[in-house]
Image (cartoon, coloured by chain):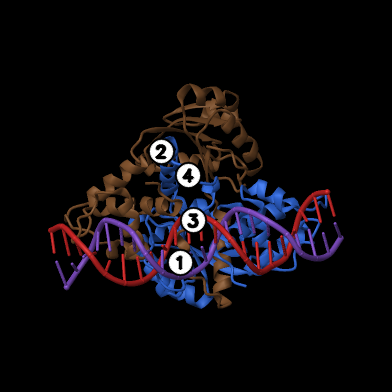
Chain colours: A blue, B brown, C purple, D red
Amino acid sequence: MDLSLPTIKRLVALYRIASELQGSPPQTLSSAKLGQLLGVPSHTLRKDIANLGGVGTTGSGYNPQALCSAIAQRLGLHTPRKACIVGLGRLGSAVMHYERFGESGYSIVAGFDTNINRLETLRADFALYPVYEMAEVIRRQAIELALLCVPADAAGASAQALIGAGIRGILNFTPHNLGGGHQGVVIRNIDFLFECRMVSSLLTLQQQGSPLKSADTSFV
Amino acid sequence: MDLSLPTIKRLVALYRIASELQGSPPQTLSSAKLGQLLGVPSHTLRKDIANLGGVGTTGSGYNPQALCSAIAQRLGLHTPRKACIVGLGRLGSAVMHYERFGESGYSIVAGFDTNINRLETLRADFALYPVYEMAEVIRRQAIELALLCVPADAAGASAQALIGAGIRGILNFTPHNLGGGHQGVVIRNIDFLFECRMVSSLLTLQQQGSPLKSADTSFV
DNA sequence: GCGTGTGAACTGGTTCACAGCG
DNA sequence: CGCTGTGAACCAGTTCACACGC
């Protein structure tokens, strides 16, 4: 069975909730309960989970850890993968220090920057390289994910270089849209300004009395 | 005409592109060109833009600044609104220093934290308050947006407090899903771990040979 | 002829309703 | 009797194809 993109998103969100709830009291989770927690109708979740197959006893709800591991397995959330940080300025450093990154399944194995001085002064528990070695390091170490933290005006070029080096995914923290479809490379934008504007838009339309169907604005 | 959520997202993305391109050479933008830049088929964009009405001459393309201002007006991107930061730790400080925030149309007028010491030592060009004054300040100043930067375990309670105080939108930077549908409050999650897992999932499915229709993984 | 605008066809994701198991 | 699993109905958004203005 193929999963649709919305379904994948909900499953990833479910994964966190389920993993948080798989703690001490071995409760059982109903689709209604989960739906409430996530802001999604229960039948949608039932469909989503049904796609995984085999989880959930008909009649009682879902077992948290069964659900958790089913999602993780189906989506490969535990697959160990290598990541690198491109751009070690303020933003890159912040990302680099994010404690919970380990939970993602990725391990950061390299950092790149154009500024040689910065490379020498920075303290990191992974190797740092000048950018001109980027392609080679990525290939040699089979790095799959790049955390793109360069200044906005360098984003396009960096992305091209990364794709040329065979990267598989890019988390784009720069405020620059990397839309140019490059087949096979997964790109996700984490864009503060964009989200601000989304809120603004939704508020505006809502204040004008536009329906704005379903409260799922936090999703999608 | 009502706009759908996917349409709104594309228009917001378009807005940035158009505003970047409205510079020196007064060119004209075709839907094909824009589509390529955004990774979206041209006819989809044509539909989206057509919703705005009146932009675009049949035959030649779109005028960048006309497009820009049409989007801004329709979505209220230039509407001045007030925002506050809730939680002034490492994350909150980073958000607070984000230079380009001004472009969003919001101005930050207040910051809140439980830690009184922190309030006294922090340097900001807006007023800082202890949390117990939060509801009152939000109401008095008619603050519409909250940038939620508290620790994960405080996220739920803070969100409740904000909603109780009449906030209209929340940008949730905490790794905690705020799904619980609260009618009328726009919530958007900016979640690093979630995005990492999304990439992981998409790579996994893709490597298994699942179709993963359309390269629009960066959208939605 | 290039490129927008748009009504009509289509696709696929969501919603519904009910069968079935604990 | 509560709650999951699922096939059928529904609907929104995307895709297509063509008419029209420059």
Which residue carries the number 1 mark?
A129
Residue drawn 55% across the image and 78% down it: B209
How far, Cα to Cα, is label 3 from label 2? 44 Å
Disc 3 marks a residue whose amino acid type is Leu
Work out whether mark 3 precedes mark 2 in sequence or the reverse, and give the earlier one. Answer: 3
Host chain of mark 1: A
The answer to which quarter of the image holds residue B124 is top left
Q: Nearer the viewer, residue A20 or A50?
A: A50
Host chain of mark 3: A
Identify the secondary structure beneath mark 1. Answer: strand
Would you say the residues marked 3 and 2 are in contact, meaning their CB atoms lie under 8 Å apart?
no
Would you say the residues marked 4 and 3 are in contact, meaning their CB atoms lie under 8 Å apart?
no
Left or right: residue B135 versus residue B127 is right
A72 versus B144 height, above or below: below
Residue drawn 60% across the image and 24% down it: B132
The mark closer to the camera, 2 or 4, is 4
Which residue carries the number 2 mark?
A204
Residue drawn 28% across the image and 50% down it: B19
Label 2 crowd bin: few (<14), some (14–19), many (20+), radius 10 Å: some
Q: Position of residue A171 (x, y in %)?
A: 48, 60
Q: Position of residue A216 (x, y in %)?
A: 54, 48
Q: Nearer the viewer, residue B7 or C21?
A: C21
How far, Cα to Cα, is label 1 from label 3? 11 Å
Left or right: residue B87 versus residue B3 is right
Disc 1 marks a residue whose amino acid type is Tyr
How far, Cα to Cα, is label 4 from label 3? 47 Å
Which residue carries the number 3 mark?
A122
Residue drawn 56% across the image and 68% down it: A82
The mark closer to the camera, 4 or 3, is 4
Residue B147 visible in rendering:
yes
Which residue carries the number 4 mark?
A212
